[in-house]
Structures are given as structure tokens and as C-alpha cells.
Amino acid sequence: MSSSFFIKSKSNPKLSKKGKNTAGTKRKSKVQAKKPNSKYNVEISSDSDTEGPTVPKKRQANEENEYDETPQEKKLRLAKLYLEQLKEEEEKRAEEDDFETDLIAGRLQEEVLEQKGKLQRPIAKDLIAPDASEIRLLRGHKLPITCLVISPDDKYIFSAAKDCSIIKWDVESGKKLHTVHGGRKGTEDRHVGHTAHILCMAISSDGKYMATGDMNKLIMIWEAETCKHLYKFTGHKGPVSGLSFRRGTHDLYSASHDRSIKVWNVNENAYVETLFGHQDAITGLDSLSRERCVTAGGRDRTVRVWKIAEESQLVFHGHEGSIDCIQLINEEHMITGADDGSLSLWSVNKKKPLSTVRQAHGCHGDAELQQPHWVASVAALHNSDTVASGGFCCETLNPFSQFSGFVNSLKFSNSGQFLAAGVGQEHRLGRWWRLKEAKNGIYVIPLKRKPSNPEETKMTD
């Protein structure tokens, strides 16, 4: 590094009378006027400096060697600095590339595990019950809510009810963004929307389309962003009780009380095929990424896995009561609920349940005539160990929260940050009971987690 400095020059005293520099310094030249008394009779040294005496050459050379550098040395130094900078940039870039490669590899590994049904994120052990003040109630429907879905980005909730209406909610503010009012019976030809109880709904994985099914055997397709009605599908001979979009596509599966499964292509506004097998009204349907769907057969007490491409089905037995709801946890496992109060966990590789919880929501009635509370709805946080069930009276997510009514629909947000529960005074499929004290609405329940302790965090492969 070069630095600026000053050197005061000093006259060398070792000069002979003849003007020779006995110390080896430069020779001095003298200029003398002809007249000794002239004012110009002065002595001027050629190596004198106005700033002071000169520095001996040996000392000056040492100081120059200390502070100055030759052009070649400067080029060498700058070249070394440049090479060091390049090395640092390449090392940093390599670290970033390795990090990105690890991320991509991790993502691909997750997708492979997800396709195989072996991806599981442990979440349940970290959940804690929210405070009652943190649970929000969204009210807008006049009659019991029967179904709901959450948009893929978790910003909106769509709900439907026995009043034939559809409402789009903003999750953050809790405000209604759009309302599609229901029509009266007999106005089907001129009313845009449903004129009978809506039993089920689904939204595509890209958030583009929404589908709803009603007691009038109709399936209606909507533009999810604007709630604009696009078209309707007809063909079922009974109430439409289940709908699901295949993830990553616009293929729609529908189930009905007519005991059939139908496949539709929403992009093409087209019917594809019909599948038969159940011996009683189908009460629930779900699907994920594979070209297959699962159904609950109600009083035929069977769960079925439909392989669409192979045109085959797998039949599972296990419940003693009517199976009213079903939900896939991943591609290989599912959960069902029945009116005998039981919850069952299934694997597609076994014909019997892996595990069953009896009287999951307790019992009601006199001691001698006690009956289990029905399980009216189930939900699963995909690829995790967390599920939820909703029942009759004041039970849902016990012990997370309790409120009066029938929990007719449950959905986890995709991020796992909250659970939406559609509650009504009546069961979604009938009017066997009516709880007047219950409120028809959507409860938004935050899923709080225990604070993480860095000391207890362990890295696992």
C-alpha cells in the first residue's frame, strides 16, 4: 500500500573548500559576483531544498523501499487481490448452489414420498388449545351450513348451506366478499344458482374452479375468483353428496345417493364416465393426486377405492354403523367416521381398519338408553399425523374447543395455520334433531403450536 509522506532535505556539512563532497554527495556549484560587496554575493547550492535540509541517500533509499512500490509490484498486488475476490465469490456461489441443490433434492424427495403415501410431518404433538377469544365466528347463512372449502392460498373460505346460498369470505377480515343467493323451488329455469339444499362443494388445486352439488341432482361450476356461474352438469339420478377435484388437474369426481360415481372434465365442460359398485347411497368422497378416489357407502358399511384408469375398485369393511364421512390423509391412508360414533384409520393395502376409536365423541341419553354421538365430519392435514372430527352437540376437536351444534364440515388450511368448522342447528343430511341454541356459522380456529426450544431441536436425516 502506498502512502504520501514528506521528507525534509538537509545540506551535507562534509564539503571541502574546493567544493568536493567528501561524503559522496553531489558536488556543489558556487556562483560568486565579481564585486565582493555586491548584494548578489550569495552562494546557491543546486541540491538545496526550500523545505529544509536533504536526507542522506542511504536513508532515503531505505524509506522509499518501505513506502513505495514499483509498477510491477503494484500489478502483482492487484492481481492477488483480484484472485482472492474471485475465489471468495466462487466459494459463496458454490455454497448457494449446494443449498439450492439440497432444497431441490429435498422437495423431490418429499414429492416421491407423497406419491407413495409415506410422507408424514409430525405436527400433533406441538399443538396447544387456543383461547376462546381467539376463535372467530363468521355468520351470514340463515340455515345450517352443510359444507365449506378453503382456497389454496388460505385467503378465502367458501361456504354453502341449506338456504341454497353460497358465500365467499375473506379469512383475514372475516367479511363477506360475494354472496350467491338461493332461489325458491320452481324457479330453476330463471334463477342463477341453487334452489335446493347444497350438500357438497370442492375447489380445484389452482383455485380456478369451484363446484357445488345439491338435492336437485345438479352440479354447478363456478369461477372461484368472481363467483360467476359458468355451467351445470346433469346426469345423477339422486342428490349429489360428494365432490372432489383431482389435484393438479380439472378432473372432477362426483358421488350421489343414486350409488354411482361420475367423472367430469371441467375444462372441456364434458362428462367422461360412470362407475358403479356401492349398494346404498354414497355419503362422502375424496381424492388427491392419483387417478383414483375414495368413497363412503353409508349404510352398505363399505369404503371403496376407485382406480379410474384400471376401471377397478377395492372394497373395505369395518364399521358397524352407517359410514357418513371420509377423508384422505395421504395417497395410502384415510380416515372415516360413522353414526355409531366410531373413527377408523385405514390403509389401502389392508381390508380392515388399522385402528378404530369407539364412541369418539361420547354418548347422550339416559344411562340405560345411551347412544353414541354421531361423527358427522372428518378432516386431515395432508401428509401429517393430524386429523379432526366433528360431531353432534358440543364436540369438535376435543379438547381444542367446544360449541353447540352439528359440525357438518371441517377443513384444515393448506398451511396448517387454522381449521374451519361449518356448524349448523341440524345435521347436513336430515332433520333428526334441531338445536335451537346453536348458531349457524363458520368457526375459524387457530392452530397454535408450542414455542420451539433451540436446545431441544435435533437434526435428523
Image (cartoon, rainbow, N blue to C red):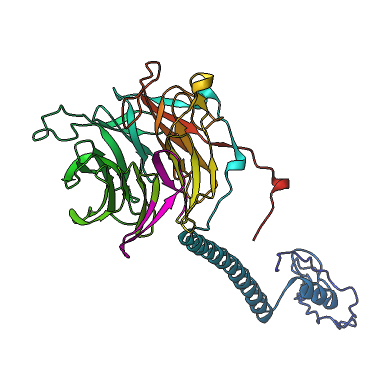
x and y percentages locating residue 458 in the rendered image:
69, 52
x and y percentages locating residue 161 in the rendered image:
29, 30
Q: Is residue 427 above or below residue 54?
A: above
Q: In the depicted view, which residue is nearer to us: 399 or 431?
A: 431
Q: Quadrant of the N terminus?
A: bottom right
- Magenta run includes residue 310: yes
x and y percentages locating residue 403 in the rendered image:
47, 23
x and y percentages locating residue 3 in the rendered image:
71, 65
Q: Which stretch did the figure color magenta?
A: 304-330
Q: Is residue 27 above or below residue 82?
A: below
- Magenta run includes residue 157: no
Residue 54 seen in this snapshot: yes
Residue that appears at 57% across and 45% down:
123
Query: Does 343 sit left or right of 257 as displayed?
Result: right
Q: In the depicted view, which residue is nearer to us: 383 or 257?
A: 257
Q: Is residue 225 above or below residue 63?
A: above
Residue that appears at 53% across and 65% down:
105
Q: Residue furthest top?
A: 437
The answer to which quarter of the image holds residue 175 is top left
Q: Quadrant of the C terminus?
A: bottom right
Query: Does 264 sit left or right of 289 as displayed?
Result: left
